Image (spheres, rainbow, N blue to C red):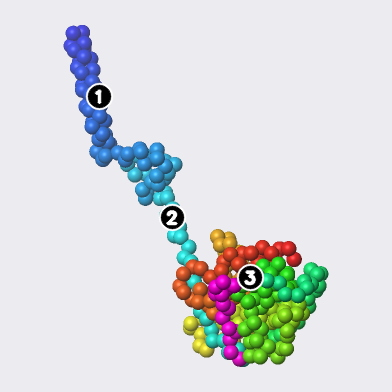
Amino acid sequence: MRFTRTHAVVGSFTVVAAVLAATVVMLERGDDPVTGAEPRPSAVFETGALPTPGESADAEPSASPSPSVKPSPSKSPKPKPKPKPSPKKVDLPGPPPPAPKPSPPAGAKCPIHKGAGAPMADVEAALEAAAARKFWTVSQVTLPAKVIKAVAMQESGWQSTIVACDGGIGTMQVMPSTATWLNDDSPFTLDEDVNTLQGNTMLGSAYLQWLIRYFGMKYGFGCEEPDPDVSPAPACTPDYTLREDDCRQDPAVADSKEWCLLNAVIAAYNFGQGAVDKEILDGDAVWYPNATYVLNVRALMERY
């Protein structure tokens, strides 16, 4: 009896050893001793790659699915570029202003100065008076003094006597053709001398105010997008206020590159409204053909 028990114990140890050896063989092959499935490679977690759906980045890899593991959230799609506005018909009296000359004539010796320069205090007073004068009598167009001051500083450095290579005259660098248009063919009744400080600044202010109404009307600034299910669309009165906050709608875009009435007017004073229209409607994500000019004027506005 004693001999028999000893053999039974030895036999039991033999069976246990055989089971352990089989388990070791299965693990060395990479088989799952429970399900028989291949285990997921741990490198997915070690390299920081996203787990596959059904797994958590914080969980240890497991051969069998766990009901407590939530799927990781999918990546948010990149925001689509803001669509460009649809232009509206603008019915302003008189012909549009002439397009500015793209470059100075070949061989021109410029810039030059004509006459005696006005003191800076006089230039500032003239710019403030020009900004305060309202040229439109049928709309609420206003021109902040700091806008015309910044444009004048960018254009001429407030030099009242300077004549540029392209023909721009004085503090506001008004082109002779633009001065003629403003005096004779624009909606305004003007008789300003572009060669004087007062006349020059008044012409520059009139042009800026014309641009404010042009872009405000054409692109419906201050108006809600029309509902396609509502016909006819409700009437809208454009908002002609030049607000810097309107140029800060998208934190991913520089203020000087945002679509807003202020930036459109600044760009058009330099390149003409036709060039800005073309850039707006060409289908890309750029709003202005002269982004550096807009940036400079916006920075100069901080002085005033």
Disc 3 marks which amino acid? Cys
Q: Quadrant of the C terminus?
A: bottom right
Nearer to us of marks 3 and 2 is: 3
Picture quadrant where residue 115 is located: bottom right
Query: From the image, which quarter does the N terminus lie in?
Result: top left
Query: Where's residue 250, x and y in %?
Result: 57, 64
Where residue 30 sits, quadrant-wise, is: top left
**In the image, which disc is placed on residue 221?**
none
Q: Is residue 120 above or below residue 19?
A: below
Note whether residue 80 is visible.
yes
At horizontal 26% and vertical 40% (from top left) the residue drawn is 37
- Residue 20 is marked as 1
Percent position of residue 43, x then y: 35, 38
> What is the secondary structure assignment of the residue under circle 1?
helix
Gap in Å between the C-alphas at discs 2 and 1?
46 Å
Q: Could you tell me which residue is drawn at 72 percent across and 75 percent down?
A: 114
Task: State which mark lies toward you, 2 or 1.
Answer: 2
Q: Which residue is mark 2?
A: 75
Task: Tell me which numbered mark, 1 or 3, is placed earlier along the sequence.
Answer: 1
- Report the side of 213 relative to 85 (left or right): right
**In magenta stretch: residue 96:** yes
Magenta range is 94-110
Residue at image mark 3: 110
Q: CA distance from mark 1 to mark 3?
A: 97 Å
Tell me if residue 140 comes above or below residue 8 in the rendering: below
User: Could you tell me the amino acid type at mark 1?
Assistant: Leu
Majority secondary structure of the magenta segment?
A: loop
> Is residue 189 rendered to the left or right of residue 21?
right
In the image, is residue 79 part of the stretch drawn in magenta? no
Q: Nearer the viewer, residue 9 or 241?
A: 241
- Mark 3 touching mark 2, by CB under 8 A? no
